Image: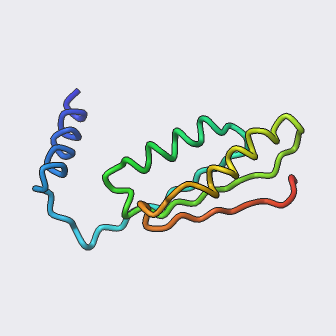
């Protein structure tokens, strides 16, 4: 419970503009592997977009190639989302697509 209260206090300081940015901070990149679970993937990315440190985060999406025909619908939904959505809130947004399933 105490950790949660400290985290919330930090978030409140950031929202009120009382957080001093540490210019020496190194932010970890994020890798998100995906294939066909479009709803889960989209919810994940939209949640990350709302994160206060999204602007400092390099995001890598690893989009696998469908192995079964049941995977195609979700895979196509993810591809469409990646084409039409705005990811400028991140430091960088990189997509790694496989052309074949190994």
Asked which quadrant contains residue 53, the reply is bottom left
Instruction: Tell me if residue 60 comes above or below residue 67 in the rendering.
Output: below
Q: Is residue 83 left or right of residue 101?
A: left
Point out the residue furthest to the front here.
84
- Spot occupied by residue 100 in the image (x, y as percentages of width and height): 87, 57
Residue ID at (59%, 65%):
94
Q: Residue at x 65, y 39 (%)?
A: 38
> x, y (%) of residue 59?
52, 60
Q: Position of residue 45 (x, y in %)?
A: 51, 47
Residue occupying image coordinates x 86% and y 52% = 101
Q: Quadrant of the C terminus?
A: bottom right
Left or right: 1 as drawn, with respect to 41: left
Vertical placement of 39 versus 92: above or below?
above
Q: How many marks?
A: 0
Is 41 located above or below residue 29 in the figure? above
The residue closer to the viewer here, 38 or 8, is 38
Residue at 52%, 38% in the rendered image: 43
Give the camera-side residue of 80 and 8.
Answer: 80
- Which quarter of the figure is the N terminus placed in? top left
Q: In screen coordinates, is 74 left or right of 9?
A: right
Q: Nearer the viewer, residue 70 or 31?
A: 70
């Amino acid at each position: 419970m105490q950790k949660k209260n400290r985290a919330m206090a930090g978030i409140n300081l950031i929202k009120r503009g009382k957080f001093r940015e540490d210019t020496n901070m190194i932010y970890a990149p994020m890798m998100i592997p995906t294939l066909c679970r479009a709803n889960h993937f989209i919810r994940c990315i939209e949640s990350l977009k709302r994160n206060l440190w999204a602007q400092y985060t390099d995001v890598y999406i690893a989009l696998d190639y469908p192995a079964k025909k049941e995977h195609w619908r979700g895979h196509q939904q993810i591809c469409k989302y990646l084409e039409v959505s705005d990811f400028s809130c991140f430091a960088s947004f990189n997509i790694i697509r496989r052309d074949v399933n190994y």
